[in-house]
Image: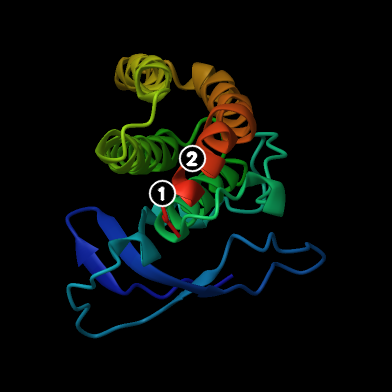
Amino acid sequence: MSVEVACVEGSVERTRIQSVTAPSGRTPHPVIQHRVRHRHMRRARDRSRFLPIPAAAAASLYSGIFSLSLVWQDRYRVHVAHLDRQHRRIVTILNRAQYLEADDRRGVETVLNVLVASMRRHFADEEDLLASHGYPGWGRQTREHERCLGVLYGYQVRLRDGRVDEMVAAFEWVGDWFARHLEISDKAYEPFLRACGCR
């Protein structure tokens, strides 16, 4: 599988997601896609289209041991466009994890850091929107977000300490948590935001 680098920042490659050619005999996952070279990557308004992918991770995309079954489905939609885009991006990042080797510390750390940053940004946007409309369940939603980030920060510390073997549990935990959160907590505010005219 060939990987073309779009732009190198330090040790991390920033690449635009496009398509993939799988190694012989392997079926590509719809989320894993090869990158198209860009001589100069402009500052895009939607930075979420770009994911930092370390070169080491590219070599092991089809032989990972993580087992995640979280796939974006219509039942996860809350029918607020920018929240649905963020939810879908988080699911995309989670699915990238299953194509990493558990002993690929650099690749695992990159995906975990991108995941934490994306979730932190999404939680802040979601909480701001709910607070601005006076959603009565705002406090409960915020506490759930804080709990999730607390667990993820703990896994980041463990990974920095070299405990790569625990990252399988990390990605499986956040995948299960996020699916339940989408179907229960986030779906609970959908009718409220719809009544407020949010689309």
Which image quadrant for residue 106? top left
Dots 2, 1 in contact, CB < 8 A: yes
- Image quadrant in which the N terminus is located: bottom right
* Residue 90 as seen in the image, left or right of residue 10: right
* Secondary element type, mark 2: helix
- Image quadrant in which the C terminus is located: bottom left
> How many marks are shown on the rendered structure?
2
Which image quadrant for residue 157? top left
Q: Amino acid at mark 1?
A: Cys
Label ID, residue 132: none
Instruction: Provide the residue designation for mark 1.
Output: 196
Query: How far separated are the C-alphas under marks 2 and 1?
Result: 6 Å
Q: For this rendering, which residue is in front, 32 or 153?
A: 153
* Secondary element type, mark 1: loop
The residue lying at 64 percent from left, 34 percent from top is: 183
Q: Amino acid at mark 2?
A: Phe
Q: For this rendering, which residue is in front, 2 or 196?
A: 196
Q: For this rendering, which residue is in front, 13 or 152?
A: 152
Residue 65, percent from left and from top: 67, 35
The structure's colour scheme is: rainbow
Task: Find the residue positioned furthest to the bottom.
Answer: 39
Instruction: Provide the residue designation for mark 2.
Output: 192
Task: Find the residue positioned furthest to the right.
Answer: 25
Residue 72, percent from left and from top: 65, 51
The residue lying at 67 percent from left, 63 percent from top is: 30
Q: Is residue 164 above or below residue 91?
A: above
Tell me if mark 1 has few (under 14), some (14-19) or many (20+) residues whose alpha carbon lies within 10 angstroms of its own. few
Residue 79, percent from left and from top: 54, 55
